[in-house]
């Protein structure tokens, strides 16, 4: 009967608009929740078969969807480990309850933003109990990622705040100007000396002492020096001796013309490098290639170190943590150096809106979302990781209030239809008294 179908359609309309009211209420309630994704209610009409001149109302049904791929605006914060995804992708996290059990079987959850801070055990975790996940770095700062279509290999990001770190010196670049006048006949032939500090394998300071002795000819100029290197860690033992010959040509005068190796590692004229062995191992020293004016030179009458650079650092404590746009978590030491300790990937999947929403703005994959893949942040389709930032709620309060008015009117209208049907049915029953 068409009157009964009208009643049923209006009841369905009340239920559908009540569902829409629930999503609007949820959106408004979470308008200040970082990382919140809007829920929306879609209506679909139900059409019944009609015959002749009669029409039966089919009504309406509703379906609820969370728009997970809609991002909110990013706001800056003062915490270096407040993280947000700028663009496509999700941060992998794990529940604190699973990490604390320490059984190695962690379920990967996803979120787009989080305020992470180190807890008592050094883990980067949110106040709601979710631990940031990533690949641990090797001691040299490189990261072995493993398989990217599984969460196996991801570990909770843990920072050992009591960690000491130091890096031994393995490379040096030395540029020195030697006085050309000292290789002239009749000069005093006084040697020139220089000490260059290096860090050994135990983080202690040692020195390579370098002595430059000019060759004084009987007449003219020799343009030749003997460079002797000794290691303080070996009690001053000589670790290398080289004869340096400088050009006196119109073009390139004062640059290296030839290097003869007496002892120590052989000099490579193409790269300008030689290798000497200190007590802790080999150190590669760059003194400049043949004809290069940025390395060893012989000009004028003054002795002056022009360039001394080296790697390595003394032992220091962790002073802070930072995360760059590519997801690399770096420990900052009070000696001024930094070292990669973890890499946080970004997770992407074909249909983010197909994921299952959980508490605290976290999500889990489902058959509808498709298989996930772990990308390096900034590679492939994924965006970058923004530090000192949080993602605001995707709720547009003005839009939600507008929909609230529409929903209220639609609900009232459906209720009015029910009231009208009731009155019509009452008139029908009054036909027979």
Image (cartoon, rainbow, N blue to C red):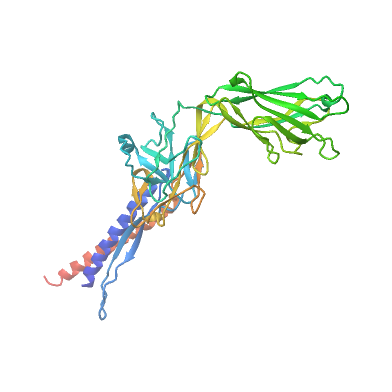
Which quadrant of the view contains residue 312? Answer: top right
- Residue 401 lies, in percent from the top left, at 41, 52
Q: Is residue 288 left or right of residue 76?
A: right
Where is residue 336? Give x, y as percent.
57, 29
Placement of the C terminus among the 4 image quadrants: bottom left
- Foreground: 232 or 316? 232
Residue nearest the observer in this picture, 123 or 226: 226
As drawn, the residue found furthest toward the bottom would be 52
Q: Does residue 311 appear in the picture of this structure? A: no
Q: For this view, does 128 lie left or right of residue 286?
A: left
Q: Position of residue 206 (x, y in %)?
A: 60, 22
Residue toward you, 53 or 281: 281
Residue at image coords 51%, 44%: 326
Q: Position of residue 43 (x, y in %)?
A: 34, 62
Q: Is residue 14 above or below residue 246?
A: below
| Residue drawn where x is 33% and y is 42% of the image | 106
Residue placed furthest toward the left: 433
Q: Does residue 94 show up?
A: yes
Q: Nearer the viewer, residue 382 or 233?
A: 233
């Amino acid at each position: 009967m068409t009157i009964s179908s009208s009643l049923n359609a209006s009841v369905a309309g009340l239920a559908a608009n009540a569902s829409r009211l629930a999503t609007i209420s949820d959106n408004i309630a979470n308008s200040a929740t970082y990382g919140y994704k809007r829920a929306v209610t879609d209506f679909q009409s139900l059409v019944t078969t009609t015959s002749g001149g009669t029409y039966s109302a089919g009504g309406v049904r509703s379906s609820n969807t969370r728009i997970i791929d809609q991002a909110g605006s990013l706001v800056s914060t003062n915490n270096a480990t407040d993280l947000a995804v700028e663009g496509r992708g999700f941060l992998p996290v794990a529940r604190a309850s699973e990490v604390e059990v320490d059984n190695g079987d962690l379920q990967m959850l996803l979120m787009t933003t989080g305020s992470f801070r180190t807890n008592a055990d050094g883990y980067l975790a949110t106040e709601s109990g979710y631990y940031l996940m990533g690949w641990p770095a090797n001691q040299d700062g490189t990261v072995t990622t493993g398989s990217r279509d599984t969460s196996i290999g991801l570990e909770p990001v843990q920072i050992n705040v009591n960690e000491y770190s130091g890096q031994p010196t393995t490379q040096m670049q030395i540029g020195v100007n030697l006085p050309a006048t000292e290789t002239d006949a009749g000069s005093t032939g006084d040697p020139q000396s220089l000490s260059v500090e290096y860090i050994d394998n135990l983080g202690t300071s040692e020195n390579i002492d370098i002595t430059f002795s000019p060759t004084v000819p009987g007449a003219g100029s020799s343009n030749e020096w003997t460079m002797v290197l000794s290691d303080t860690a070996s009690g001053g033992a000589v670790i290398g001796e080289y004869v340096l010959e400088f050009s006196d040509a119109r073009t390139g005068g004062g640059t290296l013309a030839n290097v003869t190796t007496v002892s120590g590692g052989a000099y490579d004229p193409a790269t300008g490098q030689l290798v000497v062995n200190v007590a802790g191992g080999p150190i590669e020293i760059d003194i400049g290639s043949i004809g290069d004016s940025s390395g060893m030179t012989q000009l004028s009458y003054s002795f002056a170190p022009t360039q001394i650079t080296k790697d390595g650092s003394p032992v220091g404590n962790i002073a802070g943590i930072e995360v760059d746009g590519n997801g690399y978590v770096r420990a900052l030491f009070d000696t001024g150096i930094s070292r990669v300790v973890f890499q946080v990937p970004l997770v992407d999947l074909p249909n983010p809106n197909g994921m299952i929403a959980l508490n605290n703005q976290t999500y889990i994959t489902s058959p509808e979302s498709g298989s996930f893949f772990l990308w390096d942040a900034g590679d492939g389709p994924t965006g970058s990781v923004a530090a000192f930032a949080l993602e605001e709620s995707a709720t547009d309060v003005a839009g939600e209030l507008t929909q609230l008015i529409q929903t209220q009117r639609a609900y009232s209208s459906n209720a009015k239809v029910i009231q009208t049907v009731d009155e019509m049915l009452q008139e029908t029953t009054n036909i027979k008294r």
